[in-house]
Amino acid sequence: MKKATAITAMVVIAFGASGCSVADPDTSQIVLHYSGGAFSSQQFEYCTQPGIRSTGGSGDFDFYYPAGQRTYVFSDRPGADAPPIRVSTKNQTELIVRGAITFTLNPSCEPYTDSTGREWKGGKLQKFHDTIGRQNTAYADSGGDPMPDGWKSVLNIYVGAPAERAMDNAGIGFPWQDLYSNVDAKNAWTKAVEDRLPQLIKDQAGDDLFIINNIQLDKPDVPDSLRAELENNQAAALRQQTAQTDQQAAQNWPGGLAAYQDYQQKQAINKAISEGRVNPLIVPQGSPVIVGGAR
Protein backbone atom coordinates (compact mmCIF):
# COMPACT_ATOMS: atom_id res chain seq x y z
CA MET A 1 0.00 0.00 0.00
CA LYS A 2 2.85 2.38 0.82
CA LYS A 3 4.46 1.52 -2.54
CA ALA A 4 1.27 2.45 -4.40
CA THR A 5 1.06 5.76 -2.54
CA ALA A 6 4.66 6.61 -3.47
CA ILE A 7 4.01 5.84 -7.12
CA THR A 8 0.88 8.01 -7.05
CA ALA A 9 2.84 10.88 -5.53
CA MET A 10 5.50 10.59 -8.22
CA VAL A 11 2.82 10.68 -10.91
CA VAL A 12 1.27 13.79 -9.36
CA ILE A 13 4.67 15.50 -9.14
CA ALA A 14 5.48 14.59 -12.73
CA PHE A 15 2.10 15.84 -13.90
CA GLY A 16 2.51 19.07 -11.99
CA ALA A 17 5.99 19.65 -13.38
CA SER A 18 4.82 19.02 -16.93
CA GLY A 19 2.12 21.65 -16.47
CA CYS A 20 4.56 24.42 -15.50
CA SER A 21 5.07 27.37 -17.83
CA VAL A 22 8.65 27.93 -18.96
CA ALA A 23 9.98 31.23 -20.26
CA ASP A 24 12.99 30.62 -22.47
CA PRO A 25 13.81 33.85 -24.36
CA ASP A 26 16.79 34.09 -26.66
CA THR A 27 19.21 36.99 -26.27
CA SER A 28 17.03 39.28 -28.41
CA GLN A 29 13.82 38.85 -26.39
CA ILE A 30 12.34 39.93 -23.09
CA VAL A 31 9.37 38.16 -21.48
CA LEU A 32 6.46 39.32 -19.34
CA HIS A 33 5.15 36.56 -17.08
CA TYR A 34 1.49 36.58 -16.02
CA SER A 35 -0.24 34.24 -13.59
CA GLY A 36 -3.91 33.37 -13.71
CA GLY A 37 -4.67 30.33 -15.78
CA ALA A 38 -7.80 29.60 -17.79
CA PHE A 39 -10.37 30.34 -15.06
CA SER A 40 -9.03 33.51 -13.41
CA SER A 41 -7.87 36.96 -14.53
CA GLN A 42 -4.26 37.36 -15.58
CA GLN A 43 -1.95 39.25 -13.23
CA PHE A 44 1.54 40.49 -14.02
CA GLU A 45 4.20 38.70 -11.96
CA TYR A 46 7.69 39.50 -13.29
CA CYS A 47 9.90 40.07 -16.34
CA THR A 48 12.40 37.54 -17.65
CA GLN A 49 15.47 39.19 -19.10
CA PRO A 50 17.05 38.23 -22.46
CA GLY A 51 18.71 34.82 -22.53
CA ILE A 52 17.51 33.81 -19.03
CA ARG A 53 15.26 30.80 -18.51
CA SER A 54 12.54 30.89 -15.83
CA THR A 55 9.72 28.61 -14.72
CA GLY A 56 6.22 29.65 -13.68
CA GLY A 57 3.12 27.95 -12.40
CA SER A 58 0.76 25.67 -14.25
CA GLY A 59 -1.42 27.60 -16.66
CA ASP A 60 0.61 30.81 -16.45
CA PHE A 61 1.27 32.91 -19.54
CA ASP A 62 4.48 34.27 -21.08
CA PHE A 63 4.55 37.08 -23.65
CA TYR A 64 7.72 37.62 -25.72
CA TYR A 65 8.80 41.04 -27.05
CA PRO A 66 11.94 42.32 -28.82
CA ALA A 67 14.81 43.43 -26.59
CA GLY A 68 17.40 45.91 -27.81
CA GLN A 69 17.44 48.06 -30.91
CA ARG A 70 15.09 47.44 -33.80
CA THR A 71 14.73 49.31 -37.10
CA TYR A 72 11.55 50.45 -38.81
CA VAL A 73 12.29 50.72 -42.54
CA PHE A 74 10.05 52.59 -44.98
CA SER A 75 11.24 51.89 -48.50
CA ASP A 76 10.35 50.12 -51.74
CA ARG A 77 13.18 47.63 -51.19
CA PRO A 78 12.31 43.99 -50.39
CA GLY A 79 11.90 43.31 -46.67
CA ALA A 80 10.89 46.87 -45.74
CA ASP A 81 8.32 47.34 -42.96
CA ALA A 82 6.35 49.90 -44.95
CA PRO A 83 6.41 51.65 -48.33
CA PRO A 84 8.08 55.05 -48.78
CA ILE A 85 6.37 57.95 -47.03
CA ARG A 86 4.76 60.69 -49.13
CA VAL A 87 5.57 64.15 -47.78
CA SER A 88 3.64 67.37 -48.41
CA THR A 89 5.49 70.55 -49.37
CA LYS A 90 4.81 74.30 -49.37
CA ASN A 91 3.71 74.37 -53.01
CA GLN A 92 1.41 71.33 -52.64
CA THR A 93 3.63 68.84 -54.45
CA GLU A 94 4.24 65.55 -52.65
CA LEU A 95 7.72 64.10 -52.47
CA ILE A 96 8.67 60.51 -51.67
CA VAL A 97 10.95 59.80 -48.71
CA ARG A 98 12.74 56.55 -47.90
CA GLY A 99 14.55 55.92 -44.65
CA ALA A 100 14.72 54.10 -41.33
CA ILE A 101 13.99 54.79 -37.68
CA THR A 102 16.04 52.89 -35.11
CA PHE A 103 14.23 52.46 -31.81
CA THR A 104 14.07 50.36 -28.64
CA LEU A 105 10.90 49.13 -27.00
CA ASN A 106 11.18 50.59 -23.49
CA PRO A 107 12.41 47.58 -21.45
CA SER A 108 11.81 49.07 -18.00
CA CYS A 109 10.08 46.64 -15.63
CA GLU A 110 10.55 48.90 -12.61
CA PRO A 111 7.25 49.76 -10.87
CA TYR A 112 6.05 53.27 -11.62
CA THR A 113 2.96 55.46 -11.59
CA ASP A 114 1.99 57.12 -14.88
CA SER A 115 0.60 60.61 -15.41
CA THR A 116 -2.98 59.42 -14.84
CA GLY A 117 -2.09 58.02 -11.40
CA ARG A 118 -2.24 54.36 -12.48
CA GLU A 119 0.37 52.08 -10.97
CA TRP A 120 2.24 49.60 -13.12
CA LYS A 121 3.98 46.81 -11.23
CA GLY A 122 5.84 45.80 -14.38
CA GLY A 123 6.83 49.29 -15.40
CA LYS A 124 6.54 50.70 -18.89
CA LEU A 125 6.97 47.32 -20.54
CA GLN A 126 3.84 46.07 -18.76
CA LYS A 127 2.00 49.25 -19.75
CA PHE A 128 2.96 48.66 -23.39
CA HIS A 129 1.68 45.07 -23.24
CA ASP A 130 -1.57 45.86 -21.45
CA THR A 131 -2.48 48.96 -23.48
CA ILE A 132 -1.06 48.16 -26.94
CA GLY A 133 0.60 44.76 -27.36
CA ARG A 134 -2.22 42.57 -26.06
CA GLN A 135 -4.95 44.21 -28.17
CA ASN A 136 -2.89 43.89 -31.37
CA THR A 137 -1.49 40.40 -30.61
CA ALA A 138 1.94 41.95 -31.05
CA TYR A 139 3.88 39.36 -29.00
CA ALA A 140 5.56 36.06 -29.83
CA ASP A 141 4.51 32.89 -28.03
CA SER A 142 7.88 31.17 -27.64
CA GLY A 143 11.58 31.87 -27.45
CA GLY A 144 13.17 32.47 -30.83
CA ASP A 145 9.85 32.84 -32.66
CA PRO A 146 9.60 35.66 -35.24
CA MET A 147 7.39 38.59 -34.37
CA PRO A 148 3.82 38.26 -35.69
CA ASP A 149 1.91 40.54 -38.05
CA GLY A 150 0.44 42.29 -35.02
CA TRP A 151 3.89 43.65 -34.18
CA LYS A 152 4.18 45.12 -37.69
CA SER A 153 0.76 46.73 -37.27
CA VAL A 154 1.88 48.30 -33.98
CA LEU A 155 4.98 49.75 -35.66
CA ASN A 156 2.90 51.24 -38.48
CA ILE A 157 0.49 52.85 -36.00
CA TYR A 158 2.89 54.02 -33.29
CA VAL A 159 6.08 54.70 -35.29
CA GLY A 160 5.15 55.03 -38.97
CA ALA A 161 2.10 57.29 -38.58
CA PRO A 162 3.90 59.78 -36.28
CA ALA A 163 6.85 59.78 -38.69
CA GLU A 164 4.57 60.72 -41.56
CA ARG A 165 3.04 63.56 -39.51
CA ALA A 166 6.47 64.85 -38.48
CA MET A 167 7.68 64.88 -42.11
CA ASP A 168 4.49 66.56 -43.34
CA ASN A 169 4.56 69.21 -40.63
CA ALA A 170 8.18 70.02 -41.44
CA GLY A 171 7.76 69.68 -45.21
CA ILE A 172 5.06 72.35 -45.63
CA GLY A 173 7.65 74.96 -44.74
CA PHE A 174 9.69 74.26 -47.88
CA PRO A 175 9.02 74.36 -51.65
CA TRP A 176 9.53 70.92 -53.17
CA GLN A 177 12.36 72.23 -55.34
CA ASP A 178 14.37 73.10 -52.22
CA LEU A 179 13.85 69.75 -50.52
CA TYR A 180 14.73 67.97 -53.76
CA SER A 181 17.87 69.87 -54.73
CA ASN A 182 19.00 72.17 -51.90
CA VAL A 183 21.25 70.47 -49.34
CA ASP A 184 20.78 73.16 -46.70
CA ALA A 185 17.00 72.97 -46.98
CA LYS A 186 17.08 69.18 -46.75
CA ASN A 187 19.24 69.34 -43.63
CA ALA A 188 16.93 71.89 -41.99
CA TRP A 189 13.91 69.71 -42.78
CA THR A 190 15.63 66.63 -41.37
CA LYS A 191 16.50 68.49 -38.16
CA ALA A 192 12.86 69.56 -37.76
CA VAL A 193 11.71 65.94 -38.16
CA GLU A 194 14.27 64.72 -35.60
CA ASP A 195 13.11 67.35 -33.10
CA ARG A 196 9.39 66.60 -33.46
CA LEU A 197 9.21 62.83 -33.94
CA PRO A 198 9.99 61.54 -30.40
CA GLN A 199 7.20 63.64 -28.86
CA LEU A 200 4.72 62.62 -31.57
CA ILE A 201 5.50 58.94 -30.94
CA LYS A 202 5.10 59.44 -27.20
CA ASP A 203 1.75 61.17 -27.72
CA GLN A 204 0.57 58.36 -29.99
CA ALA A 205 1.54 55.63 -27.49
CA GLY A 206 0.39 57.53 -24.42
CA ASP A 207 3.82 57.40 -22.78
CA ASP A 208 7.49 57.04 -23.69
CA LEU A 209 7.07 53.35 -24.52
CA PHE A 210 9.40 53.63 -27.51
CA ILE A 211 12.92 55.05 -27.23
CA ILE A 212 14.11 56.64 -30.50
CA ASN A 213 17.79 55.95 -31.10
CA ASN A 214 18.35 57.28 -34.62
CA ILE A 215 16.47 58.72 -37.59
CA GLN A 216 17.86 58.24 -41.10
CA LEU A 217 16.10 60.06 -43.95
CA ASP A 218 17.21 59.71 -47.57
CA LYS A 219 17.08 62.63 -49.99
CA PRO A 220 13.42 63.32 -50.89
CA ASP A 221 12.59 62.02 -54.34
CA VAL A 222 10.02 63.16 -56.90
CA PRO A 223 7.15 60.86 -57.96
CA ASP A 224 7.35 59.23 -61.38
CA SER A 225 4.77 61.60 -62.90
CA LEU A 226 6.74 64.69 -61.87
CA ARG A 227 10.01 63.07 -62.93
CA ALA A 228 8.62 62.47 -66.44
CA GLU A 229 7.45 66.10 -66.61
CA LEU A 230 10.88 67.37 -65.53
CA GLU A 231 12.61 65.17 -68.12
CA ASN A 232 10.27 66.35 -70.88
CA ASN A 233 10.85 69.99 -69.93
CA GLN A 234 14.60 69.44 -69.88
CA ALA A 235 14.49 67.71 -73.27
CA ALA A 236 12.40 70.55 -74.74
CA ALA A 237 14.83 73.14 -73.38
CA LEU A 238 17.76 71.18 -74.85
CA ARG A 239 16.06 70.97 -78.25
CA GLN A 240 15.41 74.69 -78.22
CA GLN A 241 19.00 75.42 -77.27
CA THR A 242 20.25 73.09 -80.02
CA ALA A 243 17.98 74.76 -82.59
CA GLN A 244 19.25 78.18 -81.60
CA THR A 245 22.83 76.96 -81.88
CA ASP A 246 22.16 75.46 -85.32
CA GLN A 247 20.53 78.68 -86.50
CA GLN A 248 23.52 80.75 -85.42
CA ALA A 249 25.94 78.29 -87.04
CA ALA A 250 23.98 78.30 -90.32
CA GLN A 251 24.00 82.08 -90.47
CA ASN A 252 27.79 82.13 -90.14
CA TRP A 253 28.45 79.09 -92.37
CA PRO A 254 30.26 79.69 -95.72
CA GLY A 255 27.60 79.31 -98.37
CA GLY A 256 24.71 80.02 -96.04
CA LEU A 257 21.88 77.77 -94.84
CA ALA A 258 21.93 75.40 -97.87
CA ALA A 259 25.63 74.67 -97.42
CA TYR A 260 25.19 74.11 -93.67
CA GLN A 261 22.29 71.66 -94.24
CA ASP A 262 24.35 69.76 -96.83
CA TYR A 263 27.21 69.53 -94.32
CA GLN A 264 24.86 68.24 -91.61
CA GLN A 265 23.46 65.61 -93.99
CA LYS A 266 26.93 64.34 -94.87
CA GLN A 267 27.82 64.19 -91.18
CA ALA A 268 24.71 62.11 -90.48
CA ILE A 269 25.58 59.69 -93.31
CA ASN A 270 29.16 59.29 -92.08
CA LYS A 271 27.91 58.61 -88.54
CA ALA A 272 25.44 55.99 -89.79
CA ILE A 273 28.20 54.25 -91.77
CA SER A 274 30.63 54.29 -88.82
CA GLU A 275 27.96 52.78 -86.57
CA GLY A 276 27.21 50.04 -89.09
CA ARG A 277 23.62 51.11 -89.66
CA VAL A 278 24.14 51.37 -93.45
CA ASN A 279 26.54 49.64 -95.85
CA PRO A 280 28.35 51.95 -98.26
CA LEU A 281 28.32 51.03 -101.95
CA ILE A 282 31.77 51.66 -103.43
CA VAL A 283 31.70 52.38 -107.18
CA PRO A 284 34.97 52.63 -109.16
CA GLN A 285 35.61 56.08 -110.54
CA GLY A 286 34.20 56.47 -114.04
CA SER A 287 31.80 53.51 -113.77
CA PRO A 288 28.24 54.13 -114.93
CA VAL A 289 25.61 54.06 -112.16
CA ILE A 290 22.00 53.30 -113.04
CA VAL A 291 19.43 53.97 -110.35
CA GLY A 292 15.93 52.58 -110.73
CA GLY A 293 16.49 51.70 -114.38
CA ALA A 294 13.77 49.80 -116.23
CA ARG A 295 14.39 46.36 -117.70
Image (tube, rainbow, N blue to C red):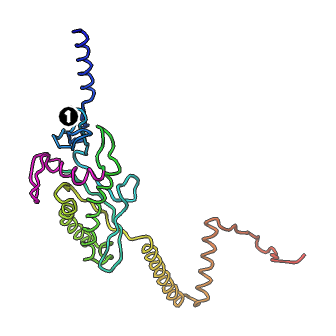
Q: Which residue is drawn at 76% across and 73% down?
A: 285
Rendered-image quadrant of the N terminus: top left
Q: In the rendered image, which quarter is residue 98 located in?
A: bottom left
At 54% from the left and 88% from the top, the residue drawn is 250
Residue 114: say if magenta: yes
Other residues around mark 1 within 10 Å, as few (<14) / some (14–19) / many (≥20): some
Q: In this view, does 198 lie above or below 240?
A: above
Residue 21, quarter of the rendered image:
top left
Q: Where is residue 133 in the image (x, y as percent from the top left)?
A: 26, 51
78 displayed left or right of 291: left
**Dot 1 corresponds to which residue?**
52
295 or 82: nearer the viewer: 82
Q: From the top left corner, tell me how far across and down residue 64 is, in percent.
A: 26, 42
Query: In the picture provided, is 273 more to the left or to the right than 72?
Result: right
Image coords of residue 294 (percent x, y) = 88, 77
The residue lying toward the viewer, choosing from 45 and 86, is: 45
Percent position (x, y) of residue 33? 20, 40
Looking at the image, the residue that sits furthest to the right is: 295
Magenta-tinted stretch? 107-136
Q: Identity of the amino acid at label 1? A: Ile
> In the image, 205: left or right of 255?
left
